[in-house]
């Protein structure tokens, strides 16, 4: 199954490593602001905005017929045998059909952040457990899953790695059909990247007001050039 991920990245993303921050690692991407800055996460208006933006962007990137890879990466110590299974909660709770879950594959990779090792951080003692599930949009309870991802930095019943703040998790939705990747990295923001810049124009134009202001100038340069 990792061959599918590796081949896809090699064929369409120039062997880009699947790891955060995707927006800064690839030429064609948009970083969207999801939550309201400086507003409490549980604020009713903030929750409404988080739900609206995450699901609207998701439905703009995926449709019912697209082939999808739902990927969960758990970053933990090499000998941690408990946490490597924690992400199965993603598939047991947010995939509708148990038969679909039977397709789930699990591999262990060298820590995907090894290239970032600095300031005394020893990533060599860490590994990334990668779970990969081929599926369709209709098979995912994506609204609930996106909500759970947005809660990952907070103590909440929907936390996927509840009670284990030292360990990291990243969940990616790869659109094999459109050659696009959706990564809600936390409640603050979401990266959408594409193999072809043209495939991002509709998102750029339709949800321009949602673009993170910090990166807006660089994003505008990409999408306003040669248009």
Image: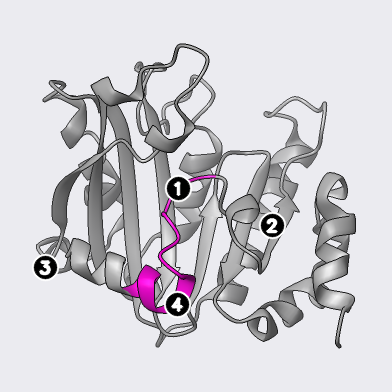
Image position, residue 10 (x, y; %): 37, 71
| Mark found first going from the N terminus, 1 or 2 | 1
Q: Which residue is mark 3?
A: 99
Q: Residue at x 40, y 88 (%)?
A: 65
Element carrying mark 2: helix
Distance between the alpha carbons at the discs numbered 1 and 2: 25 Å
| Mark found first going from the N terminus, 2 or 4 | 4
Does residue 138 show up? Answer: no
Circle 3: is it few (<14), some (14-19), or many (20+) Cα within 10 Å?
few
Is the N terminus in the top left, top right, bottom left or bottom right quadrant? bottom left
- The region drawn magenta spans 8-20
The nearer-to-camera label among 2 and 4 is: 4
Do tag 2 and tag 4 residues touch (Cβ < 8 Å)?
no
Q: Which residue is mark 2?
A: 52
The label shown at residue 123 is none
Distance between the alpha carbons at the discs numbered 3 and 2: 30 Å
Q: Which residue is mark 1?
A: 19
Distance between the alpha carbons at the discs numbered 4 and 1: 15 Å
Is the C terminus in the top left, top right, bottom left or bottom right quadrant? bottom right
Relative to 100, say whether 89 is above or below: above
| Residue 135 shown left or right of residue 185 in the figure | left
Image position, residue 42 (x, y; %): 68, 28
Q: Nearer the viewer, residue 22 or 56?
A: 22
Q: Residue at x 90, y 57 (%)?
A: 217
| Residue 40 shown left or right of residue 134 in the figure | right
| Mark found first going from the N terminus, 3 or 4 | 4
Q: Which residue is mark 4?
A: 12
Circle 4: is it few (<14), some (14-19), or many (20+) Cα within 10 Å?
some
């Amino acid at each position: 199954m990792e061959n599918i991920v590796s081949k896809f990245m090699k064929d369409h993303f120039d062997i880009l490593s699947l790891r955060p921050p995707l927006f800064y690692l690839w030429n064609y991407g948009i970083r969207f602001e999801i939550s309201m800055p400086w507003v409490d996460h549980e604020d009713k208006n903030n929750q409404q905005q988080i739900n609206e933006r995450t699901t609207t962007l998701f439905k703009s990137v995926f449709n019912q017929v697209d082939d999808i890879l739902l990927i969960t990466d758990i970053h933990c110590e090499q000998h941690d045998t408990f946490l490597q299974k924690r992400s199965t909660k993603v598939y047991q709770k947010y995939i509708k059909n148990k038969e679909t879950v039977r397709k789930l594959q699990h591999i262990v990779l060298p820590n995907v952040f090894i290239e970032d090792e600095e300031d005394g951080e020893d990533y060599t003692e860490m590994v990334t457990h990668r779970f990969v599930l081929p599926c369709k949009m209709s098979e995912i309870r994506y609204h609930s899953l996106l909500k759970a991802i947005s809660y990952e930095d907070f103590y909440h019943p929907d936390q996927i790695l509840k009670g284990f703040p030292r360990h990291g998790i990243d969940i990616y939705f790869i659109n094999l059909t459109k050659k696009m990747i959706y990564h809600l990295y936390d409640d603050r923001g979401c990266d959408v990247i594409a193999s072809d810049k043209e495939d991002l124009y509709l998102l750029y134009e339709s949800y321009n007001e949602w673009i993170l202001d910090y990166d807006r100038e660089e994003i505008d340069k990409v999408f306003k050039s040669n248009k």
